[in-house]
Structures are given as C-alpha cells and as structure tokens.
Image: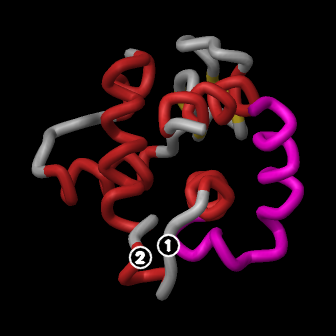
Amino acid sequence: MTLSELILAIMLVESNGNVDAVGDNNTAHGCLQLTEAYIQDAAIHAEEDWTVLDAYDKETSIRIFTAYMHKYATEERLGRNVAAEDVARIHNGGPNGWFKTSTLSYWKKVKAKL
C-alpha cells in the first residue's frame, strides 16, 4: 500500500471524498476533515501560512496532512517503524492517537477502504 492509497482511504472514511464537507459541529473541514488546530500545527511545522480555507482544496489538504504526519508519525516518536495504522490513528486521535484505544475503530474503518 502506498501513502496515496492510505490518504484516499482516509478521505473516504472522513467525507466520502467531498472537498466541501463540514463536520463535527462545524469544526472539521474538507475531504480530510481537518480541524483548525491540526492545520495550524501542520502549518507551523511546514513553515506555511495555511488556514481553515485551505482544507477545502484537496491538494493543499494532502500537503497539510503530510506535514502533520512528518511531525508526529515518525520512527523517533513511536520507537519503531511507522505503519499505516499509526498514520490513520494519529490523523484521527492527534499526536498520540497511535496508542489511544479510542482510535482502533477508526483504523478498522480505514482498513476496510484499503
């Protein structure tokens, strides 16, 4: 599986690929359902000036996702090789989502789309 395939699966789970999607009481935006905090965190890491509006552009939302993962889904943080499951669970549960039991069901949904 490639990172592109994983991102597509996450998009399907999050919004069925709808770039205009808004969820979680208007706090999650675009096809990847990015929150303002997620976007700001990724922007600081990538030295970009992304805002919530950038979540509605598919290519930019992928860049935001990738920057977030470059910060949090690393071998150094996890103490081992990073798996697709880790990436999906970090996306869903934040920087430490990879070990939160609350993100296991999310991973099952993503895995089913792969």
Residue 60 position, x and y percent, is: 32, 25
Does the magenta stretch mainly form a helix, a strand or a loop? Answer: helix
Relative to the observer, which residue lies in front, 35 or 90? Answer: 90
Left or right: residue 113 compared with residue 52: right
What residue do we see at 52% from left, 36% from top?
Answer: 2
The image shows residue 107 at horizontal and vertical percentages of 78, 53
Residue corresponding to mark 2: 75
Residue visible at 69% across and 78% down in the picture = 99
Dot 2 falls on a residue whose secondary structure is helix
Whether residue 98 is situated above or below residue 23 in the rendered picture? below
Residue, x 35% and y 19% (percent of image)? 59
The question of residue 35 being in magenta is answered with no
Q: Amino acid at mark 1?
A: Asn
Specify whether residue 111 is painted magenta: yes
- Residue 33 appears in view: no
| Quarter occupied by residue 39 | top left
Question: Could you tell me which residue is drawn at 11 percent across and 50 percent down?
Answer: 47
Residue 87 placement (x, y as % from top left): 56, 56
Number of marks in picture:
2
Q: Which residues are magenta?
A: 94-114
- What x and y, as percent, mark residue 21? 63, 18
| Residue corresponding to mark 1 | 81
Q: Which mark is residue 73?
A: none
Quadrant into which the C terminus falls = top right
Quadrant of residue 102 in the image? bottom right
